[in-house]
Image (cartoon, helix red, strand yellow):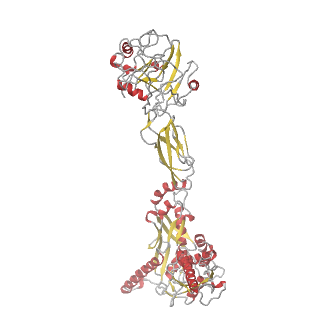
């Protein structure tokens, strides 16, 4: 900005009679100042009252104080014995100059220091304040070269207007060349200024102004320009848990640094607080959201129009902890060697989150008790060795085919946006031949007959027991049908002219659908027949009966029944009467014609090796629950356990009863091993448990 020098003379002393320029008539002019959005007129008494709030008792006779909205300059009128003198100051003015009760002078930032330091003309130095303006200005500021220039004066007039109607000193604005030797300064009412922007000699009157009187944050000599911010607020941490205790420091950069800041929030603070130094203590309420944006604001304490903001992401505390824990947990491998469960179960479990896989390994040492190679000739020995290798491989392959990859697990820990990345967890079952440190010794007999069994770390597989064969027919088919039928809600009664499945029936259909979805063998044929009563239109009743059947089938399909054949149809009011019981759906089930159960003894005995018990009655009639009943109830609920893990119920095709179907409940020992393996891990916080792992299906 151009250098600016201004003198304002104010005095009540008598003046010598001199010739004066005639004052031209005043004409109104609207100031163009960008720093003063509006001027307010305040009664002199109110102005004096406001002024007294800001000044100390040792400064008497306060006339006015002005606080403009733009440059925030504070003006004071003080009195001395010569008269009333108004003082203004600008940023950087030396304190000793500010204190001078002299003729007012101004300069702008950037004015040479040697000019700023010049003493202004003191009252009393001349009988008249400006008898010889050019000489007076020269004595005060160092010569004509430092006098005001026209553009400078015009800029100042546009930007700075002040005054109070109660004060009547004189004010004169000078520019270089405007005055000469012998010129007399005219009396101008405070609040007026000479129009130096044109060639005219007219005077313009400015509306007297007194500011709102807000003294907060101001002190004498302080710059009154609003703060300018160089960018958004920065933080030493931008992601935090909404735990009600975490603290983060906000930093704002602004000029001039003498300006005071006020800190706060924009919008919802989520229970957070902020100090006057920008230290934020986060709240503990994200209002059910996993994350929210907390907008922090720093503004000029005296001018809220100057501000900057910044954002912090607050996470739900559980979400934040999961966000920290997941990458570390997923990078690890978690092992439980020699996991022991049930009567005979023992295996190793290795969980690899990054691979979405749990490896189950059973280490076996093969033995051939009824084959003594030392007593065989070379040819017989060679054939025996080949046979042993083949039987070993058949044992391994048969178990892998039946047990590996049949079902999956999932992690259900919240927040699922984080932990669902662990899903699904596949299960790979391995039988590994070793020479020592085995979980079991598997005895494969080529000649000896007997009943396969597992106990005490020994597995006995007798001649002929390694090949699946038909067994327990037709009793198994009948038993399977009995289990399905006792869980089938039929008939299902409907309201008049309605195809909506009643709530109690819908719940039973959901359970039936879940039960069927977990059976792979046999494949059931489910016939769903809709009916309608004889009341009403025959065509409409036909459509109504079909819709009833479709709605029942939809519930079963929604429960996961995809491998069984569903056959919905409607018969309308065929054979019906007007009675309510004809508004119904009937469900019938059957096994495919020619189906027979196959017993897989090798896969059954492996079930014992991983900790499962028999699901048939056995020799002890008091043992009505399978040894894995409690785990099944824990994983799927008691109602389901009652259907699948009670001994001596009916024959059915379960691998642990007398068939070859590895069903979902037979993975409960793997599920238990996964839960306990991850429970031992250092992460996450809190640690995983049984409730965090569920079956898919």
Q: Nearer the viewer, residue 5 or 587?
A: 5
Q: Classify residue 335 as left or right of residue 49.
A: left
Quadrant of the rendered image containing residue 33: top left
Vertical placement of 425 versus 476: above or below? above
Q: Nearer the viewer, residue 675 or 226?
A: 226
Vertical placement of 593 versus 667: above or below? below
Spot occupied by residue 118 in the image (x, y as percentages of width and height): 39, 17
Spot occupied by residue 575 in the image (x, y as percentages of width and height): 61, 90
| Number of marks | 0
Spot occupied by residue 231 in the image (x, y as percentages of width and height): 42, 41
Q: Nearer the viewer, residue 226 or 161?
A: 161
Q: Is residue 457 shown to the viewer in this render?
A: no
Query: Residue shown at 58%/70% (left/top)?
Result: 635
The single residue placed furthest to the front in the displayed view is: 25
Quarter of the image with the N terminus in it: top left
Q: Nearer the viewer, residue 160 or 296?
A: 160
Spot occupied by residue 17 in the image (x, y as percentages of width and height): 44, 9
Q: Classify residue 646 as left or right of residue 230.
A: right
Q: Is residue 40 shown to the viewer in this render?
A: yes
Query: Residue shown at 50%/78% (left/top)?
Result: 562
The single residue placed furthest to the left in the displayed view is: 145
């Amino acid at each position: 900005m151009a250098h600016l020098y201004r003198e304002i003379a104010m005095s009540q002393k008598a003046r010598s009679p001199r010739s004066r320029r005639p004052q031209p008539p005043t004409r109104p002019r609207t100031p163009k100042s960008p720093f003063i959005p509006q001027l307010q007129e305040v009664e002199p008494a109110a102005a004096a009252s406001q002024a007294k709030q800001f000044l100390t008792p040792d400064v008497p006779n306060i006339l006015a104080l002005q606080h403009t909205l733009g440059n925030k300059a504070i003006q004071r009128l003080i009195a001395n014995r010569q008269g009333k003198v108004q003082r203004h100051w600008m940023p950087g003015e030396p304190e000793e100059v500010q204190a001078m009760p002299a003729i007012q002078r101004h300069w702008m930032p950037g004015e040479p220091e040697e000019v700023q330091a010049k003493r202004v003309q003191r009252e009393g130095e001349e009988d008249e304040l400006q008898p010889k303006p050019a000489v007076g200005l020269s004595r005060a500021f160092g010569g004509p070269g430092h006098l005001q220039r026209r553009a400078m004066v015009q800029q100042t007039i546009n930007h700075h207007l002040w005054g109070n109607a109660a004060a009547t000193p004189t004010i004169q604005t000078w520019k270089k060349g405007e005055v000469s030797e012998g010129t007399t300064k005219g009396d101008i009412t405070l609040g007026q200024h000479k129009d130096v922007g044109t060639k005219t000699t007219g005077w313009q009157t400015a509306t007297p102004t007194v500011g709102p009187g807000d003294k907060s944050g101001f002190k004498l000599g302080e710059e009154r320009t609003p703060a300018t911010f160089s960018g958004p607020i920065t933080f030493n941490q931008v992601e935090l848990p909404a735990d009600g205790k975490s603290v983060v420091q906000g930093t704002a950069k602004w000029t001039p640094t003498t300006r005071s800041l006020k800190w706060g929030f924009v919008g919802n603070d989520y229970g957070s607080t902020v100090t006057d130094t920008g230290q934020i203590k986060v709240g503990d309420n994200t209002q059910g959201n996993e994350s929210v944006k907390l907008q922090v604001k720093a503004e000029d304490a005296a001018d809220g129009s100057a501000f900057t903001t910044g954002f912090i992401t607050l996470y739900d505390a559980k979400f934040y902890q999961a966000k920290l824990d997941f990458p570390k947990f997923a990078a690890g491998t978690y092992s439980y060697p020699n996991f022991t469960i049930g009567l005979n179960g023992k295996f190793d479990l290795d969980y690899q989150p990054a691979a979405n896989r749990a490896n189950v390994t059973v280490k076996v040492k093969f033995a051939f008790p009824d084959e003594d190679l030392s007593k065989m000739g070379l040819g017989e020995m060679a054939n025996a060795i080949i046979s042993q290798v083949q039987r070993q491989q058949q044992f391994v392959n048969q178990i892998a085919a039946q047990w590996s990859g049949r079902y999956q697990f999932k992690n259900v820990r919240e927040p699922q946006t984080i932990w669902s990345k662990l899903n699904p967890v596949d299960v790979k079952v391995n039988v590994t031949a070793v020479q020592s440190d085995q979980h079991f010794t598997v005895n494969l007999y080529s000649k000896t007959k007997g009943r396969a069994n597992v106990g005490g770390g020994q597995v006995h597989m007798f001649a002929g027991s390694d090949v699946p064969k038909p067994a327990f027919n037709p009793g198994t088919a009948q038993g399977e049908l009995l289990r399905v039928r006792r869980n089938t809600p039929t008939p299902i009664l409907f309201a008049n002219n309605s195809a909506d499945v009643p709530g109690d029936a819908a719940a039973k259909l959901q359970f039936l659908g879940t039960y069927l979805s977990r059976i792979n063998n046999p494949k059931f044929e489910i016939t769903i027949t809709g009916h309608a009563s004889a009341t009403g239109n025959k065509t409409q009743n036909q459509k109504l009966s079909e819709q009833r059947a479709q709605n029942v089938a939809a519930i079963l399909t929604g429960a996961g029944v995809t491998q069984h054949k569903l056959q919905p149809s409607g018969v309308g009011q065929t054979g019906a009467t007007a009675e309510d019981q004809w508004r119904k759906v009937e469900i019938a089930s059957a096994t495919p014609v020619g189906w027979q159960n196959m017993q897989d003894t090798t896969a059954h005995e492996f079930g014992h090796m991983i900790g499962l018990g028999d699901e048939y009655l056995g020799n002890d009639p008091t043992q009505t629950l399978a040894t894995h009943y409690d785990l099944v109830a824990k994983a799927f609920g008691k109602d389901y356990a009652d259907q699948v893990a009670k001994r001596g119920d009916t024959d059915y095709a379960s691998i642990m009863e007398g068939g070859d179907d590895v069903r979902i409940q037979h993975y409960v020992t793997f599920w238990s091993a996964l839960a306990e393996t991850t429970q031992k891990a250092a992460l996450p916080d809190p640690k995983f448990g049984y409730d965090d792992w569920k079956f898919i299906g």
